[in-house]
Image: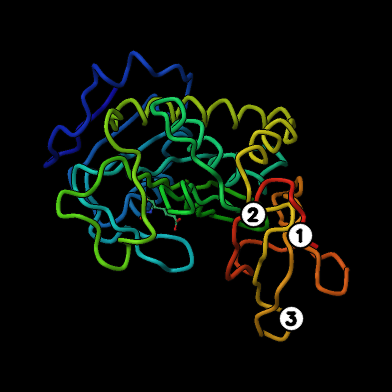
């Protein structure tokens, strides 16, 4: 059930949420807060206190929302879906987990709207090359074992009441009219559980096939990454590998695998169109 934590407002309408929720364990325990610093921190604390897998915290607004690579995540009240989900994966296919979460976000957007969200590797949700949402997966690792993952997801649902700040005005997008945060949340949790179960069953290819279908940032897409000497290098993105790495072709023809932190820039290309 949706529990409103002390001092919270009612931010989710249960009647819009539960009829759409089809999960067994993802999001079956949900708490809402009207405002937090970051939902990631709250769920991390709960994980440390033994909270079970599937726990979700949703906030109406975040004062210190965090993005990847140290960016901040603009989290105005009433306009976006901001949540963190606790996962305790006990299966080998953990590397592609962030891709599976990004895919779930795209599938949820498709389920509640006509927007055809694309996936910008590793897990940005985009439309017309503008950012619609993002995933921040933070793991707690001990002795090489992942104890838990706090999966933070932010999706822009409606245009912020005060408009986008200037730095986001040209790069951000939202789903727009018709979508509700409740419907999106339910579809997101449904899709996460389905994709998570595929990873648990070892069917990484099923997840990647759906991911690749929505990812035009490969097949020759120009990529800039940090080379071994710390300087930027150019390459062409070829394909998303089964462990979630980005396979690129260097100017001399050699291939290299990149991981999220190495990539500085990635530009879209038409699917399957290899330019050189
Ligand atoms: C990105 O940079 O693309 C990742 C953005 C992740 C934002 C979400 S909003 C809910 C959760 N709490 C945070 O502080 N960040 C994540």
Identify the residue at horizontal 64%, vertical 69% (top origin).
262
Q: Name the residue under label 2.
A: 269
How many C-alpha atoms fall within 10 Å of the one at disc 2: few (<14), some, or many (≥20)? some
Residue at disc 2, CB closer than 8 Å to ligand 1: no
List x then y, in percent, for residue 48.
43, 49
User: First in sequence: mark 1 or mark 3?
Assistant: 3
Query: Closer to the camera, 273 or 177?
Result: 273
Query: Closer to the camera, 111 or 92?
Result: 111
Q: Which mark is residue 228?
A: 3
Residue at disc 2, secondary structure: loop
Identify the residue at horizontal 47%, vertical 61% (top origin).
68
Q: Mark 1 points at which residue?
A: 275
User: First in sequence: mark 2 or mark 1?
Assistant: 2
How many C-alpha atoms fall within 10 Å of the one at disc 3: few (<14), some, or many (≥20)? few
List x then y, in percent, for residue 237.
72, 59
Label 3, label 2: how far apart the Cα atoms are? 26 Å
Q: Do the residues labelled 2 and 1 touch (CB within 8 Å)?
A: yes
**Quarter in which the N terminus is drawn:** top left
Q: Nearer the viewer, mark 1 or mark 3?
A: 1
Query: Outermost residue, top direction?
Result: 19
Q: Are marks 1 and 3 in contact (CB under 8 Å)?
A: no
Residue at disc 3, secondary structure: loop
Q: In this view, does 64 lie above or below 23?
A: below
List x then y, in percent, for residue 49.
39, 45
**Quarter in which the C terminus is drawn:** bottom right
Q: Colour mode?
A: rainbow
List x then y, in percent, for residue 249.
81, 64
């Amino acid at each position: 059930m949706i529990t409103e934590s002390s001092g919270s407002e009612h931010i989710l309408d249960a009647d819009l949420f539960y009829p759409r929720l089809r999960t067994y364990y993802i999001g079956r325990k949900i708490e809402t807060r009207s405002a937090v610093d970051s939902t990631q921190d709250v769920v991390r604390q709960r994980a440390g206190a033994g909270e079970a897998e599937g726990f979700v915290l949703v906030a109406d607004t975040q004062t210190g929302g965090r993005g990847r690579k140290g960016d901040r995540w603009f989290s105005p009240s009433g306009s976006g879906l901001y949540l963190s989900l606790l996962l305790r994966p006990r299966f080998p296919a953990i590397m592609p987990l962030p891709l599976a979460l990004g895919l779930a976000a795209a599938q949820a957007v498709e389920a509640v709207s006509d927007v055809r969200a694309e996936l910008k590797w590793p897990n940005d949700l985009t439309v017309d090359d503008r950012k619609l949402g993002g995933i921040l997966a933070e793991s707690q690792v001990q002795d090489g074992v992942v104890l838990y993952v706090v999966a933070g997801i932010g999706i822009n649902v409606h245009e912020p009441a005060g408009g986008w700040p200037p730095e986001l005005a040209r790069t951000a997008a939202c789903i727009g009219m018709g979508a509700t945060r409740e419907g999106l949340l339910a579809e997101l949790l449904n899709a996460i559980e389905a994709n998570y179960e595929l990873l648990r069953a070892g069917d990484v290819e099923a997840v990647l096939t759906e991911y690749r279908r929505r990812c035009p940032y490969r097949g020759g897409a120009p990529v800039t990454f940090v080379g071994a000497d710390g300087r930027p290098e150019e390459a062409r993105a070829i394909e998303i590998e089964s462990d979630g790495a980005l396979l690129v072709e260097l100017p001399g023809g050699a291939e290299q695998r990149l991981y999220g932190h190495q990539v500085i820039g990635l530009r879209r290309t038409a699917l399957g169109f290899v330019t050189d």
